[in-house]
Image (cartoon, coloured by chain):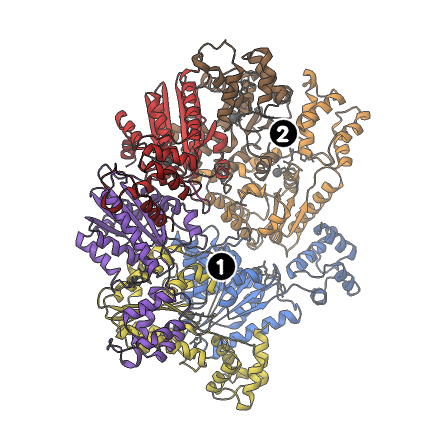
Chain colours: A yellow, B blue, C orange, D brown, E purple, F red
Amino acid sequence: DFLSALDEVKPAFGAAINTLEMCRLNGMLNCGTRHAHVLKTVKTFVEQVKKSKRTPLLTCLLEGPSGSGKTALAASIGIDSGFPFIKIVSAENMIGLQESTKCAMITKVFEDSYKSPLSIIILDDIERLLEFVSIGPRFSNVILQTILVLLKRIPPKGRKLLVIGTSSLEDKILESMTLLDTFNVDLNVPNLKPSEMKQVLEALDVFDPADVDNAVTALDEEISIKRLLMLIDMAAQAGGKGTHVHQKIELGYFFKCLQMINT
Amino acid sequence: DFLSALDEVKPAFGAAINTLEMCRLNGMLNCGTRHAHVLKTVKTFVEQVKKSKRTPLLTCLLEGPSGSGKTALAASIGIDSGFPFIKIVSAENMIGLQESTKCAMITKVFEDSYKSPLSIIILDDIERLLEFVSIGPRFSNVILQTILVLLKRIPPKGRKLLVIGTSSLEDKILESMTLLDTFNVDLNVPNLKPSEMKQVLEALDVFDPADVDNAVTALDEEISIKRLLMLIDMAAQAGGKGTHVHQKIELGYFFKCLQMINT
Amino acid sequence: DFLSALDEVKPAFGAAINTLEMCRLNGMLNCGTRHAHVLKTVKTFVEQVKKSKRTPLLTCLLEGPSGSGKTALAASIGIDSGFPFIKIVSAENMIGLQESTKCAMITKVFEDSYKSPLSIIILDDIERLLEFVSIGPRFSNVILQTILVLLKRIPPKGRKLLVIGTSSLEDKILESMTLLDTFNVDLNVPNLKPSEMKQVLEALDVFDPADVDNAVTALDEEISIKRLLMLIDMAAQAGGKGTHVHQKIELGYFFKCLQMINT
Amino acid sequence: DFLSALDEVKPAFGAAINTLEMCRLNGMLNCGTRHAHVLKTVKTFVEQVKKSKRTPLLTCLLEGPSGSGKTALAASIGIDSGFPFIKIVSAENMIGLQESTKCAMITKVFEDSYKSPLSIIILDDIERLLEFVSIGPRFSNVILQTILVLLKRIPPKGRKLLVIGTSSLEDKILESMTLLDTFNVDLNVPNLKPSEMKQVLEALDVFDPADVDNAVTALDEEISIKRLLMLIDMAAQAGGKGTHVHQKIELGYFFKCLQMINT
Amino acid sequence: DFLSALDEVKPAFGAAINTLEMCRLNGMLNCGTRHAHVLKTVKTFVEQVKKSKRTPLLTCLLEGPSGSGKTALAASIGIDSGFPFIKIVSAENMIGLQESTKCAMITKVFEDSYKSPLSIIILDDIERLLEFVSIGPRFSNVILQTILVLLKRIPPKGRKLLVIGTSSLEDKILESMTLLDTFNVDLNVPNLKPSEMKQVLEALDVFDPADVDNAVTALDEEISIKRLLMLIDMAAQAGGKGTHVHQKIELGYFFKCLQMINT
Amino acid sequence: DFLSALDEVKPAFGAAINTLEMCRLNGMLNCGTRHAHVLKTVKTFVEQVKKSKRTPLLTCLLEGPSGSGKTALAASIGIDSGFPFIKIVSAENMIGLQESTKCAMITKVFEDSYKSPLSIIILDDIERLLEFVSIGPRFSNVILQTILVLLKRIPPKGRKLLVIGTSSLEDKILESMTLLDTFNVDLNVPNLKPSEMKQVLEALDVFDPADVDNAVTALDEEISIKRLLMLIDMAAQAGGKGTHVHQKIELGYFFKCLQMINT
Ligand SMILES: Nc1ncnc2c1ncn2[C@@H]1O[C@H](COP(=O)(O)OP(=O)(O)OP(=O)(O)O)[C@@H](O)[C@H]1O
Ligand SMILES: Nc1ncnc2c1ncn2[C@@H]1O[C@H](COP(=O)(O)OP(=O)(O)OP(=O)(O)O)[C@@H](O)[C@H]1O
Ligand SMILES: Nc1ncnc2c1ncn2[C@@H]1O[C@H](COP(=O)(O)OP(=O)(O)OP(=O)(O)O)[C@@H](O)[C@H]1O
Ligand SMILES: Nc1ncnc2c1ncn2[C@@H]1O[C@H](COP(=O)(O)OP(=O)(O)OP(=O)(O)O)[C@@H](O)[C@H]1O
Ligand SMILES: Nc1ncnc2c1ncn2[C@@H]1O[C@H](COP(=O)(O)OP(=O)(O)OP(=O)(O)O)[C@@H](O)[C@H]1O
Ligand SMILES: Nc1ncnc2c1ncn2[C@@H]1O[C@H](COP(=O)(O)OP(=O)(O)OP(=O)(O)O)[C@@H](O)[C@H]1O
Ligand SMILES: [Mg+2]
Ligand SMILES: [Mg+2]
Ligand SMILES: [Mg+2]
Ligand SMILES: [Mg+2]
Ligand SMILES: [Mg+2]
Ligand SMILES: [Mg+2]
C-alpha cells in the first residue's frame, strides 16, 4: 500500500491544478493591504526564482492564525505562476499513513520537482504534516528532519524551486523547530481587522449598504476570513429564504446568528 | 480481524437509528433554556448544511460536564434531521482495537458519508476516541491527527456534511489539541441548576407537588441530568415498592438515598 | 496461550464463589458503623439493579487505605446477592500477561455478564489491574480506557449489571483518571479507629476483658483490619502456645510484638 | 533459551543452600543490638508462619544502606529455618534476560513454593530485580507489578510462605512503589556505629587490643560491615605479610589504607 | 536497501570533490579577519596532521549561526588540503533512513578513511546528522554515541585523520552532548558585522561605490553571508533587468526588498 | 553477527596487551603526586586481590575530567600487574551494536575472567558503555543494570578479580546510578595544575629551560594532559620544522598556537 499511497499523490497535471483551485473555491476577495503585501512579496520570489542564475532555491513561510487565508494565498500564487510543476503537499492525502511513508511521499514530491526547470511546492499546514500537538508537545521528528533537510537541499544544476510553507503554529514553536531559521523568509498572514472586514462585506454585497458599519461593529476586533464567510452564509439562510442569495441579510437575524455561535 | 472490526461498525441503516435511539432511551425532558439554546443552534446548522451551496461542511462541538446530556442532544438532532446518512462514532465499538484500526474505522465513516448528499456524523465522547487521560496527559496522537484532518477536509462536490462532536474535556485541553480552533463552533451543555432541576422533577411527576421545592433544596447547587435520574430511580425503589412506579417518592427516603450516595 | 488465559478466568460457577469466599476467609467481623454504612448502601444498589426497569447499569467504587477490608466487603455483597452471575476480576489471574490480553479478559467478563439477567462484577484492586505506580506515574492506558468504556456501556435489553470496584488509590489520582466521574458513586472504606478496634478485639475474644482497653491504647490512632488481625495472630503464637488458640494473649507479649513490627 | 533460563533457576535443594551459604561466606559476626533485634523479629515470623493456621502468608522487608548486611541476615534466617523450600531470587541469575522472562522466573519460584508446606523466598536486592535507577527514575514496571501481586497472593490451602525482601532503596521510593504498604512489615538494617565497630573488631581479633579504640576513632561515624571488612583485609596484607593472617595489623598501616580509600 | 544506501554514499573520488565544490558554488569572498582566523587555524591543523608523528587524529568543530559560512569554509579547506581522502558526511544523503543505517554509513566513512594515509572527514550540520530538535530536546542518541566514539578512536598505525565538524547548535547544547569536550578544539564562525558586510559588498561590486555605506546602514547590526547574498540577488532582479548582472542595484529598490523580507 | 561481534572482542592474549599498550602510546610521564597517589592505591588493590583469601573481588573507579589520563593509568596498571587475564571493555569495539549485544559482550568478558585465577577487567569510559548523554539524561539502563550486577557478583571459588572503571561523569550522576555505592572505592584523576604542567614540560624537554615558566604562566589554571600534549605537538610543527623534534619550541609561536585553540 506504500506504492498505492504514492499513486494517490501523483496526480496528472490537471488534477494538481484542480486541487489548488479547490483552495480558493469562492474566489479571492480583497482582504486589505496586509494580505496584498504578502501576495506581492511572494510574487517577487516567483520572479527571482524564474530569472536569477544564483538562486536555484527559495523558501518562504506563510504563518498566521487558523483560517486567515494562508492556503488560499499560496494556491493562488501557484496557479498564477505558470510554472510547469506545482504541487501541494497536504495531510489530507496522508491520513493514517506511517511516518516513514509520509516522509517518502514528501521526498518524492521534491525529487519530482528536480526534473522540472521551474517548480513550486506548497507544504500546506506544516503542523498537520508534522502531526503536531502542543500537549507534550509532540510531533513526528522524522518528518520534521526530512522537511528541514529538503528545505536546504540545492536542486540539481539548471533546476529551480520555490517552496511555500503555511502554518498556524506560534513563532516560538516554529523557532524551536528551527523552521524560522530554515525558511529564507517568513511572512505573516493576519486575521481581518474592522476596516478589512468592511472591505470584504462591501465586496460581497450581502448587506444593505446602510447596515455594513453596524454589522462590522457587532463583530469582534479581529475575525478570520473563514469565520466571517461562514457567519455570512449562516445569516443568508434566514427564514427559509436561503436559496435567494441575492436578497440582502436582515441585520437583526445577523445579530442572532452571531449570538448563536459566540456562546 | 480488521475487516470484521469494520463490519461491526457498518450497521444497516435501521441499526444506526437504533443505536441513536439508545442514547435517548428515557425520552427527552425539558432541561431549561440553556439546553434549548444549544438545540436551536445546532438545528440551525442542520438547515444551513441542507440549504447553502457555499457550506459543504460544518462542524460543531458540544462540550460540558460528564452526564450533562451531550450525547442525548446530539442523537436527538441526528434522528430528527431526516438526513439519509447519520452515524455515531463511539469508543464502545472499538474496545481493545489498535490505534491504526480505530483511525481506519473513523476515516471509513467519513468516506462513507461522502457518498450521501446529506450526512451527519457524531464523534461521541472525543476523549474516549482519543484514549485521553489527564495523567501525562496521554492520548492517541494518531487518532487526534486523523480527526483534525477529517474535520477540515471538504467533502466532494455536491456532498454536504455536519459533524457534531461531544466531549467532557476542559477547554484548556481542547484548545491545546487545536480542537476548539478546528471545530467551526463550540457550544456548552451545562449541568442543571436548581430552577432546571425543578422543571425536570415536575415533568417526571415523581414527588408530591408540595415536596418538589424541598427535594431541590436538598440537592447540590448543580447536578447532572444523569445523576438526578439515577437518584430518583434509587428513591423510587424504596421499601420494596419499587415496581409501583406511579406511587410518589417519600421525601424522607429521598433524603436517605441522597445521603447514601454523597458520602 | 491467550485462549488458555481465558480458560483460567472462566471458572465454573462454584469456583467463582470459592474465589469470593477466599476473600472473607476468616468470616466478617463487625467493624463499626462506617463499614456498616457502606455495606448498606451497596446492598441498596443490589436491590435497585434487581428491581428497577430504568437502571440497567450501576457502578460503585469502594476506596480506602490498603488492607481496610474493601475486597472482603465486595466479596460478601456478591455472595449474599444471590445473583446468577458474579465474577471477580483480579490481577492475580493475569500475572505477566500482556496489556491487550488483560483487556480481552476484562472485556470477556463483561460480555459474559450480558448473557445473564442479573450480574455483579467486582473489579478488584483497580491499581493492580491498571499496573499503576505513582512513580511517573505509570499505568496501562489501554486497560484504563477499556475499563472507562465498559463502565458506561449499557447492557443489552433486559440485562442488568452492578459493577463494584475497589481501590487504594488517592482521590486525586482516581479523579485524574476520570474514574470518580465514571463510577456512579464512590464510597470510602476507612481504617479502624480506637472504638472500632475495641469492637473487633471484643468480638475476637483474645484478650482478658480487662486488657482490651490497654491493648487499644497501645495501638496507633488508626490501623487497618488486616494489620490488626496479623498482630493478634503474632501475639497468639507466644511462648510456644501457638496452637492453643483459646488461651488469652498476655498483654506484655502483645506489646513486644507491637514493638517488633513498629521499628 | 527461556526454558534454559528456568533451568538455571531450578537448582537442586543442596544447590540452593550453597547459594545461601555464599551470602554469609565469612560467618556471622555479632553486629550489635540493632542487627540482633531484626534477627529476632524475623525469627518470630518464621515461627508464626510455621504454627499459625490463620497466617498462610507473611512478608517482611529488610531495608538499609548498601553493604549493611541485609542479604547475609536473610540468608542466615533461611538456612536456620529448616523449612523444606528456601529459595533466593537474585538478579545475578537473570543478567541480560528480558523483563517478561524475569517475571516468569519470579512467578515460577512462588508457584514452586506453593507445593511445599513451609517455604521461604528471599527477594534479594529488589532494586536490581526491578532494574531501578534513580535517574528518571526508571525501573521495570512489569516486574514491580508482578512482585506486588505475588506478595499479596494467598498460597493454596495448607501451604505457608514467608517472603523476605532486601533493598537499599530510600523509604520515599519504596513508598512510591507501594512496596512499604505491600510488605506486612519493614525492618531497618543499619550501618555500624562506633560501639558496634568495636564489637566487630574485637571479635575479629586483628588488632592489638590496645589499638582497637584508636582504630575505631579513625573511622567515620558510620561504616558498613562490608566496607569495614574490606579495609581490615586490605590492612592485613601489609608489607608482604598478607598470608600470615594471625599476625596483628599495624595501626600506622591501617591509617594509610584508610587514607588511600577515602580520597 | 541498506547496501544501496551505502552505495549512494560511496562516490568515486571525483564525485566527492564535486560535492565539496557545490558547497562553495559562488566562490569564496573575503568575509573579514574573524573568518580568516578560523581558516588559518584549521589550515594549521591540516599541517599538524600531515607532519606530526604524535598526532594521528585531530578533530575540530566549526560552530556559528545558521548561514554564516561554516560548510563553505570546511569544504574549501578540504579541497585545498590535497589529502587523498576527503569526504563530507551530510544528512542530505540520508533522508528517511533509519538510525542504525545512518550509524553504519557514518562508521563506514571513518573505516574507509583508515585505509588512506591522510584523510579529512567533514561531519556537516551535526544537528541534522543527530536529527536534533530543541523541543524535547530530541535527537538520535544512537548516532550521537557513534560520533562520540568515532571522534576519539585512534586510526591504525600510520594513518592520520582530521575531522571537521560544523554545527549551529548553541554551546550549551553542544556541551550537554559532550561534543565540546570531545572535539579537540572548537572555533566560532560568526555572522557579518557592518565592516565585514561592506567588504563583501565592495568585493561583489553590485552597488555604485557611493551607495555602499547607505546600503550597509540599512541592514541589521548582524547578517549572515547567506542572507546578504540572497538579498543582493533579489534586488538585482529589479524591474525586469534581472539578467544584466553587471548593472548596479538601485538603492531605493534595495530598500524595498529589505522591507519585503523583514516583515 | 552476534557471534562475529563476540569474535571481535575475543582477541588472543597478545592482542589484549597491544590494545592496552595503545592507551599509553606515548609512554607514561610523571604527572605529579596526585596521579602517583592513585597509581599507588590501585597497585595496593592489585596486591590485595593477589594475596588475600577473603577478597575474591575488588572494584575501583577512576573518575576525573576528560583527557586527564584515566585510561592510560588503568592500562598501565593492567600491563604491569602480570595477571594472566587482562581485558579492556571499550565502546570502540561495540559501535552500532544493540544494547542486548553489548550486555552479552560485557557479561562474556566477566565470565571469561572467572576461568582465570587472577584477572583484571577495565571498564573504560563507562559513560560511553552506557551510551550516556546528559540531555534527558539518557542512557542504556539495560547496560547499567548488567554492570551493577556484575560489579557485585562474587567470582567462583578460587578465582579473583579486580575491576577498574574509568569515567568522566560528574559525581552526582555516578551517585544517581548507584555506581559510587557499587564500586568499592572511587579515586580522582585530576587535570594538571601549574606545578604539574611544569614537571611534564621539563620531562618532555621541548622548551629552552628558561622558557618553561613563561609557557606555564600562559596556560590556564588547569589543563588536561591530553590537551597539553596536543598543544606542544602543534607548536612543535612550527615553520616547517615539524620533523626536527629535537629542536626547541619558540615561545612566540607557542603563544600563537595557544591563541588559535583558545578562541
Ligand atoms: N482572499 C480570499 N477571498 C475569498 N475567500 C477566501 C480568501 N482567503 C481565504 N478565503 C476562504 O476562507 C477560507 C479559509 O481560507 P484558507 O483555508 O486559505 O485559510 P488558512 O489560513 O489556510 O486556514 P487554516 O489555518 O485552517 O489552514 C477558505 O474557504 C477560503 O476559500
Ligand atoms: N433531556 C433529557 N431528558 C431525559 N433524559 C436525558 C436527557 N438528557 C440526557 N438524558 C439522560 O441522561 C443520561 C446522561 O445523558 P448523556 O449520556 O447524553 O450525557 P452525556 O453528557 O453524553 O454524558 P457523558 O459525559 O458521560 O458522555 C442518559 O441516560 C440520558 O438518556
Ligand atoms: N469485616 C471483616 N471481618 C474479618 N476479617 C476481615 C474483615 N474485613 C477484612 N478482613 C480481613 O482483613 C484482611 C484484609 O481485607 P481485604 O483484603 O478485604 O482488604 P482490602 O482493603 O481489600 O486490602 P487491599 O487494599 O490490600 O486490597 C483480609 O484477610 C480479610 O479477610
Ligand atoms: N554479621 C556479619 N558477620 C560477618 N560478615 C557479615 C555480616 N553481615 C554481612 N557480612 C558480610 O558483609 C558483606 C556485605 O554483606 P551483605 O551482602 O549481606 O550486605 P547487603 O546489605 O546485602 O549489601 P547490598 O546492599 O550490597 O546488597 C558480605 O561479604 C557479608 O558476607
Ligand atoms: N566566504 C564566502 N564567500 C562567498 N559565498 C559564501 C562564503 N561563505 C558562504 N558562502 C555562501 O553562503 C551560503 C551559506 O554558506 P554555508 O552553507 O557555508 O553556511 P553554513 O554556516 O554552513 O550554513 P548552515 O548553518 O545553514 O549550514 C552558501 O550559499 C555559500 O555558498
Ligand atoms: N602520564 C602520562 N604520560 C604521558 N602521556 C599520558 C599520560 N597520561 C595520559 N597520557 C596521554 O594523554 C592522552 C589522554 O590520556 P587518556 O586517554 O588516558 O585520558 P582519559 O582521562 O582516559 O581521557 P578520556 O576522558 O577522554 O577517556 C593520551 O594520548 C595518553 O596517551
Ligand atoms: Mg490552510
Ligand atoms: Mg456522552
Ligand atoms: Mg483488596
Ligand atoms: Mg544484598
Ligand atoms: Mg552548513
Ligand atoms: Mg579514557
Q: In x, y percent, where is residue A57?
A: 30, 67
Is B78 above or below relative to A235? above
Which of F48/F191 is in front?
F191
Q: Is residue F153 visible?
A: no
- The quadrant of the image that shows the C terminus of chain C is top right
Which of E204/A139 is in front?
E204
Q: In x, y percent, where is residue E164?
A: 30, 50
Q: Amino acid at mark 2?
A: Val
Circle 2 marks a residue in which chain? Answer: D
- Same chain check for tags 2 and 1: no
Is C246 above or below relative to F210? above
Helix, strand or loop status at disc 1: loop
Q: Is residue A124 visible?
A: yes
Which of F218/A105 is in front?
F218
Q: Quadrant of ligand 3?
A: top right
Per the image, the residue denoted by label 2 is: D185
Per the image, the residue denoted by label 1 is: A134
Is B61 above or below relative to F51? below
- The quadrant of the image that shows the N terminus of chain C is top left
Residue D21 shown left or right of residue B111 in the figure? right
In the drawing, what numbered circle is on residue E161?
Answer: none
The span picked out in magenta is F134-139
Q: In x, y percent, where is residue E34?
A: 35, 58
Helix, strand or loop status at disc 2: strand
Q: Amino acid at mark 1?
A: Ser
